[in-house]
Image (cartoon, helix red, strand yellow):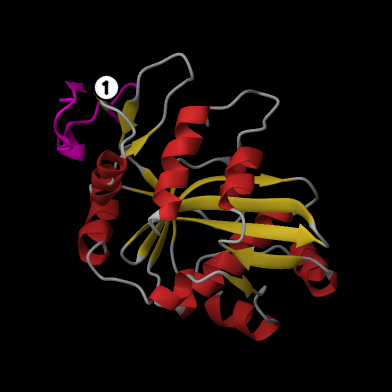
């Protein structure tokens, strides 16, 4: 494990990450905008407890959602057809990240994390998706854009399928604008049910090196309302 130089934003290669704990690569540094951008550009992300100094990770395998591999259950499809929710992009980043931090089991999304990613949002690098019922925020997600890759950080839901609606709507919006990969970092049962799978880190890095310098249309990130996919679009991507 490497100790980061406070005066440099250079990271060691992900291949040097530990096997146990899986993916731990470096320790130290801060959450300056430049350091965060450098980390994501190399396939590295911060994850640490509130009492710890920053820890930087690049796990092997890596959890990703590839184009045409999203899974939407029959139950969710039925609910989608009846939903009266509104889904927006970049309307309220601060409220989304604050909601993601509100977890009964505790959270790694500290005030320090919120400040750092809000700064990235203000630079147009981090983005949020909001699901609304009238004026009430009932679901959402946020993450970081690197070229034609979106690195999902966290999501939340206050109603059944709230976070699923955010992911499904944004996934199809991102693909329409030429997005190539949705990085989910570490798999869990919830994301696996949506089609997220694990691939070797070397394969993820190949995707990253291919797409990180390919800019996506800036219109993708404009403050806007986005829609859940139609039945035809779902069939096309599945």
Number of numbered callouts drawn = 1
Residue 84 in the image: above or below residue 8: below
Image coords of residue 4 (percent x, y): 19, 25
Q: Is residue 143 magenta?
A: no
Q: Which residue is mark 1?
A: 28
Q: Nearer the viewer, residue 30 or 212?
A: 30
Q: Is 196 left or right of 11, judged from the image as shown? A: right
Most common SS among magenta residues? loop
In the displayed structure, 104 sits above or below 229; it is above
Residue drawn at x 80%, y 59% as measured from the top left:
135
Residue at the image point whose x is 46% and y is 13% from the top: 51
- Residue lying farthest bottom? 232
For the C terminus, give its image quadrant.
bottom right
Which of these two is toward me, 205 or 199?
Answer: 205
In the rendered structure, does residue 4 fall within the stretch colored magenta? yes
Q: In the rendered image, which quarter contains the N terminus? A: top left
| Position of residue 104 in the picture relative to residue 75 (left or right) | left
Q: Quadrant of residue 106?
A: top right
Residue 179 x/y as whole percent: 40, 71
Q: Tell me where the magenta segment starts and ends, as one range.
A: 1-25
| Left or right: 184 in relation to 105 | left
Q: Residue at x 49, y 19 (%)?
A: 50
Q: Residue at x 43, y 63 (%)?
A: 66
Residue count near mark 1 (Cα–Cα under 10 Å), binned few <14, some 14–19, many ≥20:
some
- Give SS at disc 1: loop
């Amino acid at each position: 494990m490497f100790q980061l130089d406070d005066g440099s934003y250079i990271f060691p290669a992900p291949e040097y990450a530990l096997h146990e704990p899986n993916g731990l690569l470096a320790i130290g540094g801060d959450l300056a905008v430049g350091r965060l951008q450098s980390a994501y550009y190399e396939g590295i992300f911060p994850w640490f407890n509130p009492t710890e100094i920053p820890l930087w990770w690049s796990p092997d395998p890596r959890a990703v959602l590839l184009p045409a591999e999203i899974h939407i259950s029959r139950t969710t499809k039925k609910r989608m057809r009846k939903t009266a929710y509104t889904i927006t992009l970049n309307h309220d980043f601060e409220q989304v990240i604050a909601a993601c931090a509100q977890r009964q089991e505790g959270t790694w999304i500290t005030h320090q994390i919120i400040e750092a990613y809000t700064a990235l949002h203000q630079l147009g690098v981090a983005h949020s998706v909001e699901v609304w019922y009238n004026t009430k925020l009932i679901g959402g997600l946020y993450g970081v854009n690197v070229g034609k890759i979106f690195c999902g950080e966290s999501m939340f839901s206050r109603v059944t399928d709230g976070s699923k609606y955010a992911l499904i709507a944004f996934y199809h919006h991102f693909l329409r604008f030429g997005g190539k990969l949705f990085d989910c970092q570490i798999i869990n049962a919830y994301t696996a049910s949506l089609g997220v799978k694990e691939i070797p880190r070397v394969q993820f890095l190949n995707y990253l090196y291919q797409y990180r310098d390919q800019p996506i249309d800036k219109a993708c990130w404009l403050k806007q309302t986005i829609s859940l996919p139609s039945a035809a679009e779902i069939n096309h991507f599945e």
